[in-house]
Amino acid sequence: MALGMLSSDTYGLRTLAQPAVSAMTPLPPFSVVHNAAEQRFEARVQGWLCRLDYIARDGVWVFAHTEVPPLLEGRGIAARLVAAALAQARTDGVKVLPACSYVRAYLRRHPAEQDLLA
């Protein structure tokens, strides 16, 4: 089935079909994009949207939420989102406030980035 076609799930609900993926499927190359209009960093990986949402206020980006579909978890995608967001924050001269538990854990593992903390 092509991406974007409607299908019925086991409960008879109409859903937007997503491409099949498994933990063993190698990830194709992907880019992280700063979508400033939506206040998020995002990547399309195997047709799925992965994202890091933030709230910009007074020179600080509050990293509110990371989201990676369950089938893609544990493969370094969230880390790439956070790394890209921190690099952009550094370039833009803003500080960050990690409200998201994943971002807090990432910053504990990467002490060189802690100078960005608000």
Image: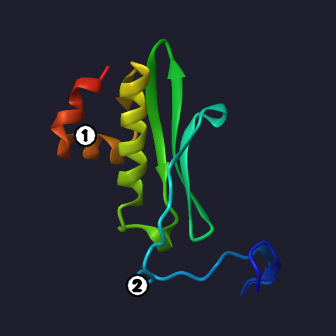
Q: Amino acid at mark 1?
A: Leu
Which residue occupies 67% across, 75% down? 18
Locate residue 77: give its quadrant. bottom left
Q: Amino acid at mark 2?
A: Met
Q: CA distance from mark 2 to mark 1?
A: 28 Å
- Up/down of 43 relative to 91, above or below: below
Q: Which residue is mark 1?
A: 107
Which residue is rendered at x = 48% and y = 12% of the image? 58
Here the colouring is rainbow
Q: Mark 2 highlights which residue?
A: 24
Q: Position of residue 90 (x, y in %)?
A: 36, 26
Note whether residue 9 is visible.
yes
Residue at the location (34% across, 43% down)?
103
- Identify whether 105 is placed above or below 63: below
Q: Where residue 68 sits: x, y (%)?
A: 49, 60
Quadrant of the frame with the N terminus:
bottom right
Q: Is there any visible trace of residue 99 in the rendered image? A: no
Q: Position of residue 67 (x, y in %)?
A: 50, 54
At horizontal 47% and vertical 37% (from top left) the residue drawn is 64
Which badge, 2 or 1, comes first in the chain's sequence? 2
Image quarter (top left, top right, bottom left or bottom right) of the C terminus: top left
**10 Å crowding of disc 2: few (<14), some (14-19), many (20+):** few
Residue 36, horizontal then vertical, whole percent: 60, 32
**Which is more toward the observer, 29 or 63?**
29
State the SS at label 1.
helix
